[in-house]
Image (cartoon, rainbow, N blue to C red):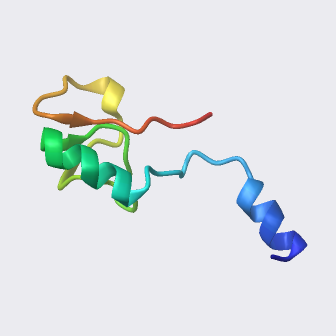
Amino acid sequence: MTNSDEKSRCKPTDERETPQWFYNVLDKAYHFTVDVAASAGNTKCGTFLLEGLQVAWRGHVWCNPPYS
């Protein structure tokens, strides 16, 4: 790994996501229907909310909140 790779890997960001394998294990048990803290590029469900705190949640909710 180069020094620039290390810097970009450690750069603070909210664009993190749960590892797919971990989500799959939980989804098998809970059958999530909506991702309430997602973007189009990292959603885990077919339905997702960009502003999950602005609306009521319905269904089986997956939430991987921002880290900052």
Return the x and y of residue 53 as percentages of the image width and height: 34, 25
Residue 7, quarter of picture? bottom right
Q: Is residue 33 above or below residue 53?
A: below
Whether residue 33 is visible to the viewer of this picture, yes or no, is no
- In the picture provided, is 48 more to the left or to the right than 51? left
Quarter of the figure with the N terminus: bottom right
Residue 37 showing in the rendered view: yes
Image check: 24 left or right of 21?
Answer: left
**Quarter containing the C terminus:** top right
Image: 58 above or below 29? above
In the rendered image, the vertical position of residue 61 relative to residue 9, given as above or below: above
As rendered, which of 33 and 30 lies closer to the eye?
30
Residue 58 image offset from top left, x and y in percent: 12, 29
* Identity of the residue drawn at 41% across and 39% down: 64
**Residue depicted at 37% across the width and 39% down the height:** 37
Q: Give x and y (percent) for residue 31.
A: 12, 44
Residue at the (30%, 37%) spot, across then down? 36
The residue at the point 26 percent across, 54 percent down is 24
Q: How many marks?
A: 0
